[in-house]
Image (spheres, rainbow, N blue to C red):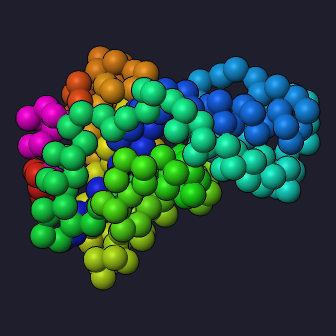
Amino acid sequence: MGRIFLFDIDGTLVRCAGAGQRAMASAFEVVTGHSLAAFPFDGMTDLAIVRIGLDRAGLVHDASIVATVLAAYLERLPSMLAATAAYCMIDGVLEALAIASAEKRGAVGLGTGNIEHGARCKLEPLGLMRHFAFGGYGCDAERRADLLAAGAKRGAETLGLAADACEVIVIGDTPHDVTAAHAIGARCLAVGTGRYTVPELAEAGADLAVDDLRDAQAHAFLRARPF
């Protein structure tokens, strides 16, 4: 049986200190002429963020407008990240990736609400993108469970296995990661390195909630085969 690891990005692998939100807000205003309404981005997909922004501005949710906003966002994101002093990799990430990568029949990918190019913009400057052979991205679907399913399917294909012959482990930092993981029959390792506390993640139903990926329990969880 194979094992597929799907890592979230923001709050799990990296801290962008609001650079992504600033890039999205700037893009939204330039394209639509309206300010992007304030709401938490944590655990949301880029498609959902733009849709909610359009809805709250009283604008039509049109695919061409969404695409234009996202293109403008991608133009701004690299410079916003470069100008953000607190943009960094989170402690414990390399240890967790080493454990996942050591799995003999394992595949390490992304399960993120970021559209694919946005994910690359956030990971490549920190040398992290090379760890991920595939992913489920915010451009695959607006619903997080659907993009995780897309990532799991790609992971199974990478291993040359059927999807039902693979265990999926989602690593994230929000209740949205937990709920979406369970919706596709995956287990979820939740880390309190984002906006949510360990008790909040445990209450959301995480299979394990820890302070960060340096935790020995997290390492054991990543290695454990529950079957």
Residue 151, x across and y down, in percent: 44, 62
| 191 lies left or right of 225 | right
Q: Which of 215 and 73 is in front in this view?
A: 73
Q: Tell me where the magenta segment starts and ends, as one range.
A: 213-222
Q: Residue at 8% across / 35% down in the picture?
A: 216
**218 is within the stretch colored magenta:** yes
> Residue 64's image quarter?
bottom right
At x 86%, y 42%, the residue is 31
Position of residue 20 in the picture relative to residue 186 (left or right): right
Compared across the picture, whether 47 is left or right of 117 comes to right
- Where in the figure is residue 185, as x and y percent of width and height? 35, 52
**x 29%, y 17%: residue:** 199
Residue 12 is at least partly visible in this image: no
Question: Where is residue 100, by image quadrant?
Answer: bottom left
- Please tell me whether residue 152 is drawn above or below residue 18 in the rendered image: below
Residue 209 appears in the figure: yes
Q: Where is residue 48 in the image (x, y as percent from the top left)?
A: 67, 41
Q: Which residue is drawn at 9% across and 43% down?
A: 220
Q: In which quarter of the image is the N terminus?
A: bottom left
- Residue 14's spot in the image, x, y percent? 39, 38
- Where is residue 20, by image quadrant? top right
Q: Which of 186 and 86 is in front in this view?
A: 86
224 is within the stretch colored magenta: no
Magenta stretch, main secondary structure class: helix
* Camera-side residue of 159 and 79: 79
Q: Residue furthest bottom?
A: 160
